[in-house]
Image (tube, helix red, strand yellow):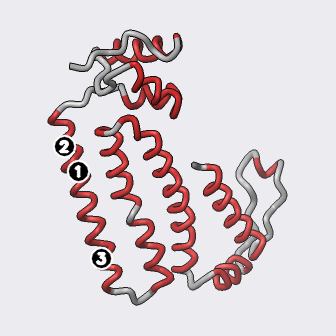
Amino acid sequence: QCQAPTAMASPAGKVMAGASAAAHGMHIHHLSSKDNLEKVVAKGGLGIVEELTRFPLTPSGLGIAGVCCIFSVILSAALVIEHLQNFRRPNVQRQTVRVLIMAPLYSVVSMMGIVWINGAVLMILLRDVYEAFCIFSFFSLFVAMLNGEREVIVHLSRLPQVTHMFPLNYVLPEWKMGGVFFYNAKYGVLQYVVVKP
């Protein structure tokens, strides 16, 4: 049996883990030693430790997680294969496939976080990197469905001018409809890709 570590990496960590265990009426499982806990703290901070140690790992929970993970991977793989077999609109379907991969990736990362806690922080980082890439792919999918950037810019230039939401409308200048609006929105998505991970 794995007991809650008697010594934590820091007093703050001891208080945090104790409060988490008391609040949920359970011991901290799946952290077999002080060394393992210290490694997780060093890699991901106390917030990650709290998230990963909040609930115990039980056979039934592991089984349910495994079944859901396998179901997600199989269903997403079937959709991806169907798109690849009917690859008639490459610009649209390429982005669609990238978005579809997000679901099984989340499932696999979550499953790995359960069974391999010391590598969970790295897995979460990889997930966040792909999530940021997926956001840009989702933006690119909309553009592709609207027949490309040129068509989007032409359509935007015909729309009435819109303003920023409150209170940004008092701080930022208006984005002229058309190319200025489109590229500012695109650069905003790209900045999220860099900042999110």
Residue that badge 3 annotates: 81
Kind of residue indicated by mark 1: Cys
Kind of residue indicated by mark 2: Ile
**Secondary element type, mark 2:** helix
Where residue 3 sits: x, y (%)? 28, 15
Residue that badge 2 annotates: 64
In the foreground, 142 or 95: 95
Instruction: Please report the residue visible at 34 percent of the width from the left and 79 percent of the height from the top.
Output: 83
Q: Give the image quarter of residue 7.
A: top left
Q: Do callouts 3 and 2 mark residues in contact (Cβ within 8 Å)?
A: no
Local packing at callout 1 (Cα closer than 10 Å; few below 14, some 14-19, many 20+) is: some
**Horizontal arrangement in the rendering, residue 73 relative to residue 50 (left or right):** left
**Secondary element type, mark 3:** helix
Q: Mark 3 or 1 closer to N-term?
A: 1
In the foreground, 162 or 23: 23
Q: CA distance from mark 1 to mark 2?
A: 6 Å
